[in-house]
Image (spheres, grey):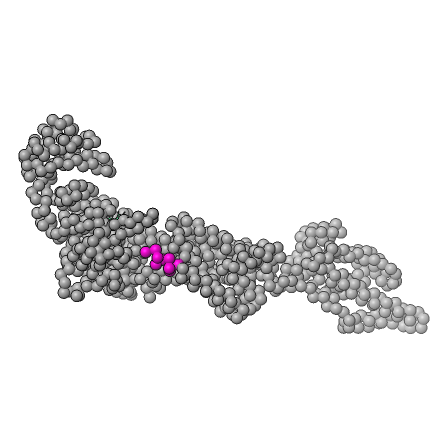
Amino acid sequence: MKIWHIALNDLLVTRSSPSTWLFLFAVPAILVVVLALPNGGFQDPNAPVYQRLDVIDSDQSPASSDLLMHMRRANATLLLCPIDNDETDRCGLGDAAFTLELATERLRQGRTEGYLTIPAGFGEAVIGQTPFKLGFYSLPTTELNPQEPLLQTVNAALTRVNALATAQRFADVLYADLGGNPEFSQQVYQRAQSYWATEPITIRFEQTPAATINSDQPVGFQQSVPGTGSMYVMNVVLAGSVVLLLERKQGTMQRILTMPVSQGAFIAGKMLSRVILGMIQFMVAFAVGLLFGTRYGSDPIALILLMFAFVLCISGLALLLATVIKSEEQGSGLALFLMLTLAPLGGAWWSLELEFIPEFMRVIGNLTPVGWVMNGFNKLIVQDGGLIAVLPNIGILVAVAGVLFAIASYRLRYEQ
Amino acid sequence: MTASSSPSLVQIRGLGKTYKRADGTPVKAVKNIDLDILTGEIFSLLGPNGAGKSTTISMISGLIPPTQGEAHIGGYSIVKQPMQAKRLMGVVPQEIALYPTLSARQNLEFFGRMYDMQGAALRQRVDEVLEVIDLKDRQHDRVETFSGGMKRRVNIGVGLLNKPQLIYMDEPTVGIDPQNRRRILDTVLLLREQYKMTVLYTTHLMEEAQELSDRVGIIDHGEIIACGTQTELMHRVGEEDRLILSIDQPNVSDTVLTRFQTEIDGVQRAVCEINPDDHSVKLIIFAQRGRKALPDAIRLANDAGVKVTSVEVREPDLESLFLKLTGRALRD
Ligand SMILES: Nc1ncnc2c1ncn2[C@@H]1O[C@H](COP(=O)(O)OP(=O)(O)OP(=O)(O)O)[C@@H](O)[C@H]1O
Ligand SMILES: [Mg+2]
């Protein structure tokens, strides 16, 4: 009961400081959004991703629009620009006039997967079955940037257009040779088209967008919410070490210890308040993410247990820190240092799974509490795992918390 | 042994504390103290800075463990039964120990809860304490906005919350103006008269000890060098008056000091005292009858070339006892 009142009083004191509101709410909230940007921005990992293909259709014939129609059908992820652009400017064209130069430039900048030119005369060439060349341009194929499917899409569409034209031409020849109905060739064409519409032999191209090729990687808010949360949990919980020092300095701790309260109860109360503040901090970060539609997997209990284990672990660190520091400046300095090294090392700023992170950094990161908790968050949020999946993470966090508290208690006793 | 069966509420036996400095050298802050504080009295522990007053209070309030000896509060050992002992006492620490960003009332309510008070009883007790320390109108203001004297009063108020039988007050008047000091001294007297509390009061001001105390213990270098009622203590000084000559020179030679003793009738001895703070120098002459010796003393001073700027005759008091026992002034 007294422990609870000591914790409540600590929260009251914390609340009375204006910087609390700034660092518990405002700064982390902003950082959640800001850090979401370099981690993949506002991209919704669940939303369909389009492959842009610029099309310069100088022919504008029924055949060319047939071709485009078949391309769309063959590949649902294909976005033909500027023809299929919409009011949200999915093509990313802005106000620029669409020209061949622009298409070339866009491809070079990697803003499109390629471009297709349909020179005038395509329609006649199809009907006449005369040789004709379309232009398809793309950047050299890389593992991250496979162009193969795109070219296949064009080819598949072209095959159909050609096949239809062949059918029609065949009908024309039949008509001419056998003196059939002039509407006959039209009928054959339509019949052929309806056969093709049932798509007896097409391949469906479903392409995975580059950013989510590795589905283990968090994107945007999935990274920035737990990352910022973990970092600022360290901020508010590690501040507990300075709070303990301050209590000693302002004599309030000594005063409480002349009352019927044990030192253990006093410290437990102070730590309880830090645990509460740490959990509030996580809630703030996760609430901001919710505002932007972030989903956190399907096991909220596991999520909360994981958060709690991390907060406990950092509380242990805070108490140990309190037994070391000699001044407030030293305390805040050390806390800031720990926060600013452990956070990026452990993957709070960016995912350690990213391609460019060297292997040794990944190893170091996975030796820190931040690494353990971020790894757990990834399992729950990105891979949609459950409690079982994060039990090892929770286990090691709680175990290390226990060790830290034990060392801190030993030092506190020895100090006297 | 219980609280009611013994006339002494606090029994201190062989109590001592040796601190360790950062470099490992030991500091004997309190040495082997024996002391009894009787139920219902105001007991003053009088001693200069660093004498060991706060260390003693810290030990008998259960804050720091003694390195030797033991103290019993109302029959409870402060070492072995600290929780029971602590329930009997209120402590007013020397430094203001409050949460500056909380209001006076929030402070009082929180510390009240540390004594298991709650609800209406707690609210009522806080109201009463606010009445005693006369801060009802400012109860909702943050303590950091208070004057030094007001903070001191809240500091005292916290010590009263649990209606203790025994209250320790460690130099509660340090650094405040005469008006607030008066108020605090009146409160201390009120605690004994009206609330029947036993008070342990520490100070380095002999006037305060003289005004308040039933009994006084004089502490120096961690030892109790005298203890008793004021009459008993005065008896130890004898009938000696002190002639205090403020002089305008850095020192007086030993030969001149001996001349005062040998040449003036009734003078026992003379010492030279330098105040380390303002470096003022005083020549103190102990004489059986001060007023009678005064003209001769001034004449001799003139003879010896000592420039006297002012003269004062003091009757025996705690100051002279301290001087007599230690050869040093208590100072303030
Ligand atoms: N934590 C400590 N570590 C080492 N020495 C200490 C410690 N606390 C006090 N001392 C030393 O113990 C001696 C007694 O100190 P204490 O505070 O008890 O004196 P005091 O009589 O209360 O003095 P004051 O009138 O200045 O408050 C001093 O010499 C002081 O320097
Ligand atoms: Mg003191």
Total count of labels = 0
Q: Is residue A155 left or right of residue B310?
A: right
Q: Which part of the image, by quadrant, shows the C terminus of chain A?
A: bottom left
Find the magenta span and give its range. A408-416
Residue A141 painted magenta: no
Q: Is residue A291 left or right of residue A401?
A: right
On the question of residue B181 being in view, the answer is no
Q: Is residue A285 left or right of residue A267?
A: right
**Image x and y of residue A301, in percent:** 49, 69
**Image x and y of residue A38, in percent:** 58, 54
Is the residue B312 above or below the residue B123 in the image? Answer: above
**Image x and y of residue A409, in percent:** 37, 60
**Residue located 76% across and 69% down the image:** A202
Work out whether residue A255 or residue A319 is closer to the camera in this orientation and state it: A319
Q: Which quadrant of the view contains residue B196? A: bottom left
**Residue located 56% across and 68% down the image:** A384
Work out whether residue A410 or residue A238 is closer to the camera in this orientation and state it: A410
Q: Which part of the image, by quadrant, shows the N terminus of chain A?
A: bottom left
- Looking at the magenta stretch, what is its main secondary structure? helix
Work out whether residue B154 or residue A303 is closer to the camera in this orientation and state it: A303
Is the residue A396 above or below the residue A97 in the image? Answer: below
**Image x and y of residue A294, in percent:** 55, 63
